[in-house]
Amino acid sequence: MRTPFIAGNWKMNMLSGEAEDFFKEFLPAVKDVQSVKIAVCPVYTLLHQVSELVRDSNVKLGAQNVFWEEKGAYTGEISPPMLKDVGCEYVIIGHSERRQHFGETNETVNKRVKAALAHGLTPIMCCGETLEDRENGKTFDVVKSHILEGLQGVYESGKEEVVLAYEPVWAIGTGKTASPDQAQEVHAFIRNLLQENFGEDIAQRTIIQYGGSVKPKNIAELMSQPDIDGGLVGGASLKADSFTALVKY
Ligand code: PGA
């Protein structure tokens, strides 16, 4: 059985005072939630503070990106051991905003995923088509290349855990959610790809989150789909009341 997993992707938002206010309200509101795993992924500058705030709670910490080298002359980068050191368990990798604005490719996604796993972080690896891809009938080709190239050589021992997030780019931050059927169709396609390429065990235990305008009003229907195991939530994770409603869907 896959435990549902809902992660908040704060993107480039929130200052320290806002983070403090958020958790003052959020932690007591969700402290009894046991059936859903919860994570929050703030900007790097808030990781230390949020790590302290969520210590001993049922909320886990994630980062929004990671470099693949351990240390050295890479000005501006952050390595997997540094994220572990500050208390991260998760790291988002290959978000479409990084692909779009910062030159992320399947190859660099793959390097980051491997480095994260090698240091005991669980990657949340993102995939998803643009509106143009969808209109040109390329959704499945694009998702397939994101998944198979991103995961190339990753399941070496078969014990590796990678969370996947299907995020159609046209649904991110636009208020246009994929319909539950549209999302389920791609999630089932991804699970099938996992099975064909990595076997039944990995296919059945891999959490596949949906992302793209997930809101309190649409989460229950999305989560009722057989292959949707959670959500990667941007905008609606920035307010304690809406993120609470999401994790208590
Ligand atoms: P959104 O973002 O919920 O604001 O659409 C989701 C994401 O980009 O992870």
Image (cartoon, rainbow, N blue to C red):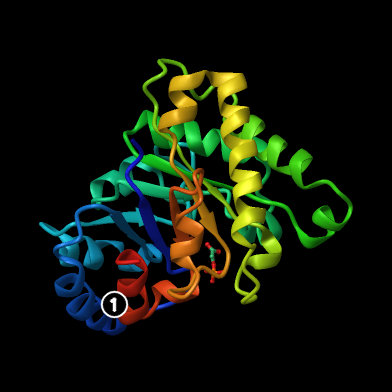
SS class, disc 1 = helix
Q: Which image quadrant for residue 175?
A: bottom right
Q: Is residue 227 left or right of residue 19?
A: right
**Residue 26's image quarter?**
bottom left
122 vs 149: above or below: below
Q: Is residue 15 visible?
A: no
Q: Nearer the viewer, residue 150 or 223?
A: 223
Q: Identify which residue is drawn at 26% across, 84% down.
A: 17
Instruction: Give the quarter of the figure containing the N terminus.
Output: top left
Name of the residue lying farthest toward the top: 157
In the image, residue 93 lies at what x, y percent? 51, 47
Q: Residue at x 38, y 62 (%)?
A: 44
* Residue 57 rendering spot, x and y as whole percentages: 14, 59
Q: Quadrant of the C terminus?
A: bottom left
Left or right of 236 in this view: 211: right
- Dot 1 corresponds to which residue? 19
Q: State which quadrant residue 157 falls in.
A: top left
Q: Is any atom of residue 92 visible in this view?
A: yes
Reply above or below: 44 against 151. Answer: below
Query: Left of 177 or right of it: where is 125?
Result: left
Instruction: Classify mark 1: residues with Cα within 10 Å, few (<14), some (14-19) or many (20+).
Output: some
Amino acid marked by disc 1: Ala
Q: Residue at x 15, y 65 (%)?
A: 31
Most extreme residue toward the left, as rendered?
A: 56
Measured as percent of width and height from the top left, residue 108 is found at: 61, 39
Q: Nearer the viewer, residue 166 or 177?
A: 177
Q: Residue furthest right?
A: 136
Q: Pick whichever, 170 or 49, lies toward us.
A: 170
The residue depicted at 46 percent of the width and 54 percent of the height is: 224
The answer to whether 243 appears left or right of 95 in the picture is: left
